[in-house]
Amino acid sequence: GGTFAQPIKLDYCHNCGDGINTPEAYEKLILDCLHGDATNFAHWDEVALSWSFVDAISQNWEENKTLSPNYEAGSMGPKASDDLLAKDGFHWWPL
C-alpha cells in the first residue's frame, strides 16, 4: 500500500465564458445577509474595542506633544534614526 501518482488530463481556458453565471462579490454578500450570515461584518463590540486603542493613542499624542523628527523625502531619514540604532550597536545598510 504505497503512494502512487496517476496522470490526469486537465483543461484550462482563460478566455472561455464559464464565468458568465458566477455570482459577483456583492451578490454573495447580500445572499449571506439574507441567510443571516454576519461573518463578513465586524460586530459592534469589535469596532468599539478597536476604537478604544485608537482613542488611547490619540489621547497620548495630545497630552505628550513630542515632535517626530522630519526629514526630506528621498533622503536616508533623520539623524535620530541613526542614533536610535547606534545606541544598540546597529546601523542602516547604505543602498
Image (spheres, helix red, strand yellow):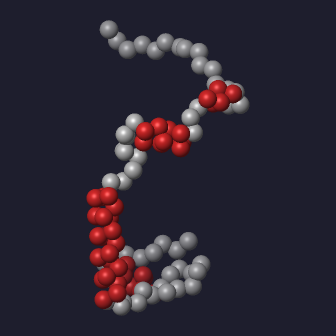
Q: Residue at x 48, y 72 (%)?
A: 93
- Residue extending furthest top? 1
Side of 82 relative to 63 (left or right): right
Q: How many marks?
A: 0
Q: Residue at x 30, y 70 (%)?
A: 53
Q: Quadrant of the N terminus?
A: top left
Residue 43 percent location from the top left of the image: 33, 54
Picture quarter containing residue 9? top right
- Residue extending furthest right? 15
Residues 37 and 19: in front is 37
As drawn, 25 above or below 62: above
Side of 73 relative to 6 (left or right): right
Residues 75 and 32: in front is 32
- Is residue 1 shown to the viewer in this render? yes
Side of 93 relative to 73 (left or right): left
As drawn, 48 above or below 85: above
Q: Residue at x 42, y 42 (%)?
A: 33
- Is residue 89 shown to the viewer in this render? no
As drawn, 67 above or below 33: below
Picture quarter containing residue 95? bottom right
Residues 13 and 31: in front is 31
Q: Residue at x 31, y 89 (%)?
A: 64
Residue 75 percent location from the top left of the image: 57, 81
Residue 79 percent location from the top left of the image: 45, 87
